[in-house]
Structures are given as C-alpha cells and as structure tokens.
Amino acid sequence: MKILVADDDESSRSFMETILKKAGYLPIIVQNGVEAWEILNKQPVRMVITDWVMPQMDGLELCRKIREAALKNYVYIMLLTAKGHSSDAVKGLEAGADDFITKPFSPSELLARLRSGKRIIQLEDDHKNANFQLLQSEKMASIGQLAAGVAHEINNPTGFVSSNLKTLTEYNRDLFKLYGLYQSLIAELQNNSQTLPKPVLDLLNSVKNFEAEIDIDYLRTDIIDLVKDCGEGAERIKKIVIDLKDFAHPGEDKLKPANINDGIESTLNVISNEIKYKATVHKNFGELPTVQCYPQQLNQVFLNIIVNAAQAIETKGDITISTRSLEKQVEIVIEDNGSGIPPENLARIFDPFFTTKAVGKGTGLGMNVAYNIIQKHKGTIRVESELGKGTRFTIVIPTQEDEQSNE
C-alpha cells in the first residue's frame, strides 16, 4: 500500500521512510502540503501522514483540501505534530484528520495506528462495494421487470405474425394445387386449340405470355422461401425475448438445477450485438451434468467476462468458450486473443474498483462481482494473460447441491 508522507523535517521524513519500508509499505515522501496535494491529484493514495506545521501549506489546510475534494476513494489521514493539548487534537479532527499522533512516537505505535487505518479503509471499501452490489441487484430487478414487459409487448404481435405465416403457408399450398389444376386445364385446351374460338385462344396466349414475363416457376419457389424465412425470423425474435427474460428475471434468486451450456448460449444471445463486430465466438461445449446454482448470477459472470474479452480486442479477433465435466464439477474456460493484461495488474484484477479502462468507461467492479458470485457457488476463478496474446479465465463450479452456499 502507498502511504504519502508530508513533513518539512528531513530527519523525521527519513525516520518514517525507514519504518514504512521495513513494514512493507510504499512511502511517497514530500516536504510540504503543496507537494502532497500535487501527488494526490496525480495518483491514487489511500493513506496520508502529514505534519501539522509546514511551510506553504500546513497539515490542517491539506486535511481540509482532501476532504473538500471529490476524490474517487476515501483517504485516511494521520496528523503528526508536537502539539499535545486536547484542543489541538480537536482542531485536527475537525479539519478532517482521522487520527492524531504526537511526537515523539515509537515505530510500534505508528504501525499500530496504520493497521487501524487500513481496517477503516477496508470497511469503507466493503461498504462502497455492498452499496454497489445492492444497486446492481436493484438494477437487474428493474431490467428484469422491463424485459418482462417488453417480452409481453413483443410476443403478442410476434405470435400474430407466426400464426398468420403458418396459415399463409397452408393457403399457398392450396393455391399452388389450384394453379396446378389451371395448368392442366390450359394444357388440355391447347391440345384442342383447333376447336376453340379465337377470343379463347387469345386469352390462352396472354396467360402463357404473362407466366413467362413474371417467371411463374421462380415466383412459386421464392414465395415458399420468403414465407419460410419470415417464420424463422419470427422464431428468432421469440428466442431473443425468452433469453432476455431468462437472463434478468425479476426477483429470481433461487438455487436450482441448470445447464451451464444453456446459460452461456442465453448470455451470448443477449450480448450478440455487443460482440459480433469485434469477435468470432467459438463454442466447444462438452456434455455437462446439471448444476445446482443461481443461473441468473452465473449468466452475469459470463456476460462480464465475455464483454471484457470483446473490449480487449482492438479490431477483429476470436473468443473461445469451452466447457467440460470434471469429477463432481464443471469447468468453463473463456479465452480471447486480445491485448492481454499487464503482469502488474493480474494480481489486482478481482479487486473492487480496480480498472484499467479510461475514466467513465468502467466501474472496476465487473470482475469483483464475478469473483464474489463464483465464491458464493463455492467455486474457483483464475486468470492467465500475456500482453499482446490474450487472456484466459478458468471457472470451476461444483455440481452438487450440498456443496453450494445457501446464502
């Protein structure tokens, strides 16, 4: 963890730098509040140790600026001073400091107070993550309700179209049969054309000429194909709506048996527009047993990983999804040939609020949500990546109900 130290006394700075490095921290040492404030605006720092009395900007002013700023994460501030009166402590705390330590102090006291600060930061992160999870749950419930409404509105006209296309297919069959009889009648009349009056012969010739003009044989074949294509399109709409309902069903959070392959297929249908221009999806699905799980939650995991994979591909690439059955477990592997993840970021990929995307492009919680869902299922998720070659996520989930969490 990085700790920003602001102190105008050289010996004090050196003393704290030695203590922090030995304890495994990464100290950033500056001489005053102005330099500290510049650092805070350039890089994320979660803990600050600042002296009270410093030139240019003192510790109290630095505390106030930090608290007034719209920083992304909470910054824990420890105010360091030789002042020991209780009124001084009150001033420091009112300025925004979280802790107050008087000089001289022992290394053990400083480290103990830092550990306390880390616990507070962790609580703050847990609280922020819990709020996000709640917001996500509410959002998914809203999406589910919206999907149910949209499905109802789309299913009705789609049902009319499907039903009418089936009826039209039957009508065409009858019309083509009648047309066959007409052709037989025309052929018979033409065989006896010498006995027919001229107006009838002219009409027969007009019919034959018009059949040739419109290419009647092609029309008969194409009508059948057009009606068939329309029927397939209506079934496609129906399947998309069903998958959308299944993906985000309102209030659906029950442990139940599910087929992982079906869940992946459903997720791919929902996000097809997100990935079809970026990647070709290859599916190597093995035969899997049913898994006792929370299907909608697992679909969220698949969605997060697949969408991230597509976003990691700069032009056009490949995403390969493989599944197989292990002993009392199923394994899901999702890999891409995108840009890959830098080695220094791999260890943090599942941390809450960690993201490599530009500001406003991601919350940094997609992978953390995926990790927590897999943990809830008593499973494992691991990531392997190489810059310029791609990334692979491997998920293993137990199949048995008694191995699942009932949280």
Image (spheres, rainbow, N blue to C red):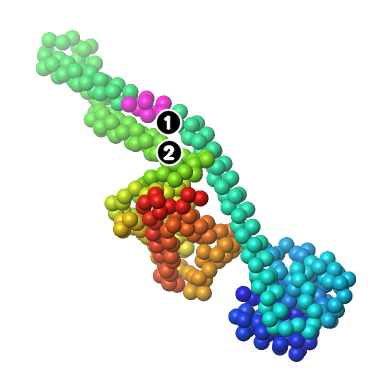
Q: Earlier in the sequence, mark 1 or mark 2?
A: 1
In the image, residue 234 sits, relative to residue 43, either above or below, namely above
**What residue type is disc 2 on?**
Ile
Cα distance in 3D space between marks 1 and 2:
12 Å
Q: Position of residue 315 (x, y in %)?
A: 44, 62
The image quadrant that residue 205 belongs to is top left
Instruction: Identify which residue is drawn at 46% across, 68% down.
Output: 339
The image quadrant that residue 54 belongs to is bottom right
Disc on res. 242: 2
Which residue is nearer to you in this view: 214 or 76? 76
Instruction: Identify which residue is drawn at 42% across, 58% down.
Output: 379
Helix, strand, or loop for circle 1? helix
The residue range painted magenta reads 159-166
Q: Is residue 137 magenta?
A: no
**What residue type is disc 1 on?**
Thr
Which residue is nearer to you in this view: 205 or 342? 342
Q: Judge from the rendering whether residue 122 lies leftward or rightward of residue 167; answer left or right.
A: right
Q: Position of residue 53 (x, y in %)?
A: 84, 80
Q: Which residue is mark 1?
A: 158
- Which quarter shows the N terminus? bottom right
